[in-house]
Image (cartoon, coloured by chain):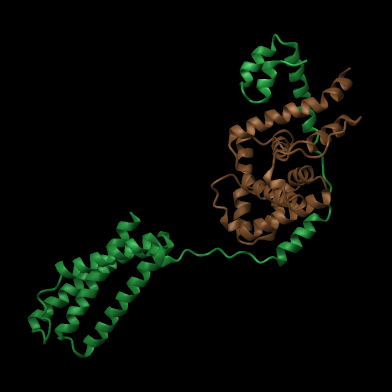
Amino acid sequence: MDEEAIVQRCKDGDLMAYRQLYERYEQPFLRTACRMLGRQQEAEEAVQETFLKLHRGIHHYKGGSRFSTYFFRILINTCTDILRQRDPEFGEDLEKAGMAFQPSIDLRQSLEKAIASLPAQARVCFILFAVEELSQTEISQILGIRVGTVKSTLHRARANLRKQLSVSLKGETA
Amino acid sequence: MSCKELEKFDRGKIDEAEFLKHAGDCPVCQEALRLDTEIFSLSKSLKQLVEAPFLWNRIEESLCQAPREVPIRKVWWRSWRFASAVVVLAAVVCLGIYFAHPKDIPSSGLLTQKALTRVEQKEQEYMQAIRNLEKLVLPQMAGLDLELNFLYRSRLETIDAQIKQCREALVFNSGNAHIRRHLMMALIDKKQTLVDVINLMN
């Protein structure tokens, strides 16, 4: 079904339409929130809060941007709020590093840890671009930053991951 | 091992095409590109399923309990379209009264039989014109903007009420020039309003 039609039904208060949105967005939202927050419990709360926020303010959505971009932006803002509550200085320094990276034997686990160690904005950009396969334009709209900033952030994230994973990846191919 | 071009690329200082051209002859950059490709293909494998079996139930429950923010309806009398329509209508009514003032009806007193026949004939012409316009306008009024639709419908209802009042008064006093004059003005007003609606729809 056309997403705009589902959104219209949501505006009319149709709970089944919300269910349809949930089926479409559950996995990308949970994956993104899990990687941003690091804990599934908090990720689930963020997704729940995202649906509530959509429900409360869906009439504000006038179709100016793609709905997926609008919806993702609510999720990212919700996750950012949770991170800010966890660390009050989070908003002041989005570029500060996350957890310390520790190489792991399993390559995928190493990548997960390396992504978790990226600075917050680089982490979100990389997850949305490399894992969820959104375009740089969509990411810029979701995060409210310029496409050029998305590009340079992705460059830095890629360089950071390359540095962290070079040993593991060389070991894997050797 | 490092390469200045790779550092520039990582800072976004050179574009991809330029970097790829350089990487063709640089083993350091070739290795970096190979690692990048591996990282990106490995990243896609992170798209695994996250199990959250009771999440929808929780969302559904909270959606049912949550009050919805009722959209603040645009206050219709503050709308610029409404304001401009009022101005246009007022201007049209004033002009209509000024130009189409039925000068052959005395402002007071009783009409002579000859004058009354002429006035009644004029009224009939207006009524016929109004009926023709209504056939055109009324079925299409639903297509008008909500505020304009409301505005014109209430305007037409007001004029109809005036016409009805005049007709009721004329039953007992058909030659009353004052009432006839009011009736004629109401008919002119109604015809002009219907013409305005047609112009708006076009």
**Where is residue A18 drawn, in percent x and y?**
69, 56
Residue at image location 64% in from the left, 38% down from the top: A139
B201, A39: nearer the viewer? A39
**Chain A's shade in the image?**
brown
The quarter of the image holding the C terminus of chain B is bottom left
Residue at image location 77% in from the left, 54% down from the top: A45
B59, B188: nearer the viewer? B59
The vertical placement of B22 against A71, above or below, is above
Residue A103 falls in image quadrant: top right
B118, A105: nearer the viewer? A105
Q: Is residue A48 left or right of residue B123?
A: right
Residue B185 falls in image quadrant: bottom left
The vertical placement of A43 against B151, above or below, is above
Which chain does the green colour mark? B
The vertical placement of B59 against A84, above or below, is below
**Where is residue B126 drawn, in percent x and y?**
21, 70
